[in-house]
């Protein structure tokens, strides 16, 4: 009888340990893919003959250049709201791996969509998966670990929606973009940096 009780207790003890091990380790061989549209392009009136992706590219070009030749070459976007055309790229960078195991790739771009409305967007994004990954904006160009994050200061934008695919994260309206020097994918339970994108400021 005592043996059965011991076995029962052992099984009850193993269940939470097994669940914790699955939560910690399963992301290493499982991908979570997302595919979010660019916020402004998703709400815009799309001119006839153009795709949402083409609209996004054209808006980025319009925001990043003052070249009149480029403006003349662009299709008529009169059907789109003025705020759609005014979308501006403020900062951008490429994701790099933190080490030989924690790898990342893709682009991180900060767009200003309107007064006090900024969004961080990932494109062609992929990072090594892990438990409870978070998206941080850090006031340092290339933080390498937890100590660097604490020293520099950072703002957490939320949990990573997926380790693969395009995705958007709202940026607090009161955050000075000068303090957004890098984007970090950070594993909160283990306090490990998975990937970093150093941001180069584009707009004022």
Image: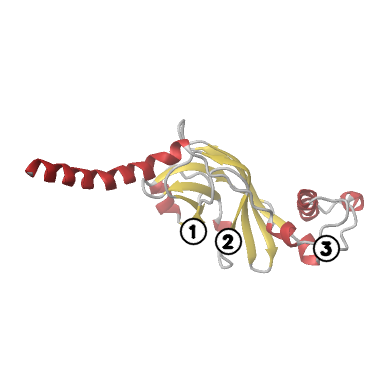
Asked if residue 196 is positioned above or below residue 159 in the image, the reply reads above
The residue at the far front in this view is 1
Instruction: Please tell me which of labels 3 and 2 falls first in the chain.
Output: 3
Residue 55 appears left or right of 131: right
Give the residue displayed 68% in from the left and 59% down from the top.
39
Crowding around mark 3 (Cα neighbors within 10 Å: few <14, some 14 to 19, many 20+) is: some
Give the residue displayed 48% in from the left and 41% down from the top.
129
The image quarter in which residue 144 lies? top left
Instruction: Please tell me which of labels 3 and 1 falls first in the chain.
Output: 3
Residue 138 appears left or right of 61: left
Quarter of the image containing the C terminus? bottom right
Residue of label 1? 155
**Picture coordinates of residue 46, whole percent (x, y):** 82, 58
Residue of label 3? 80
Give the residue displayed 83% in from the left and 63% down from the top.
80
Instruction: Please tell me which of labels 2 and 1 falls first in the chain.
Output: 1
For the residues labelled 3 and 2, the Cα–Cα distance comes to: 24 Å
Residue of label 2? 171
Q: Secondary structure at mark 3?
A: loop
For the residues labelled 3 and 1, the Cα–Cα distance comes to: 33 Å
Crowding around mark 2 (Cα neighbors within 10 Å: few <14, some 14 to 19, many 20+) is: many
Q: Secondary structure at mark 2?
A: strand
Asked if residue 172 is positioned above or below residue 148 in the image, the reply reads below
The residue at the far left in this view is 2
Q: Are marks 2 and 1 in contact (CB under 8 Å)?
A: yes
Residue 87 appears left or right of 30: right
**Picture coordinates of residue 101, whole percent (x, y):** 45, 32
Quarter of the image containing the N terminus? top left
């Amino acid at each position: 009888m005592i043996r059965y009780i011991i076995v029962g207790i052992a099984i009850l003890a193993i269940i939470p340990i097994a669940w914790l091990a699955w939560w910690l380790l399963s992301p290493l061989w499982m991908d979570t893919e997302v595919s979010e549209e660019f916020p402004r392009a998703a709400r815009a009136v799309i001119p006839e003959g153009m795709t949402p992706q083409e609209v996004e590219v054209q808006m980025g070009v319009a925001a990043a250049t003052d070249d009149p030749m480029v403006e003349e070459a662009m299709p008529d976007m009169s059907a789109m709201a003025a705020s759609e055309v005014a979308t501006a790229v403020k900062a951008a960078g490429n994701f790099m791996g933190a080490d030989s195991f924690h790898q990342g790739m893709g682009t991180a771009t900060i767009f200003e969509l309107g007064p006090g409305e900024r969004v961080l967007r990932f494109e062609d994004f992929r990072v090594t998966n892990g438990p409870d990954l978070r998206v941080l904006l850090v006031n340092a160009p290339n933080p390498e670990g937890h100590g660097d994050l604490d020293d520099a200061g950072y703002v957490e934008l939320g949990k990573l929606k997926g380790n693969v695919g395009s995705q958007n994260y709202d940026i607090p309206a009161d955050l000075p973009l000068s303090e957004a020097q890098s984007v970090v994918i950070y594993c909160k339970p283990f306090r490990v940096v998975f990937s970093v994108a150093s941001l180069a400021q584009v707009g004022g």
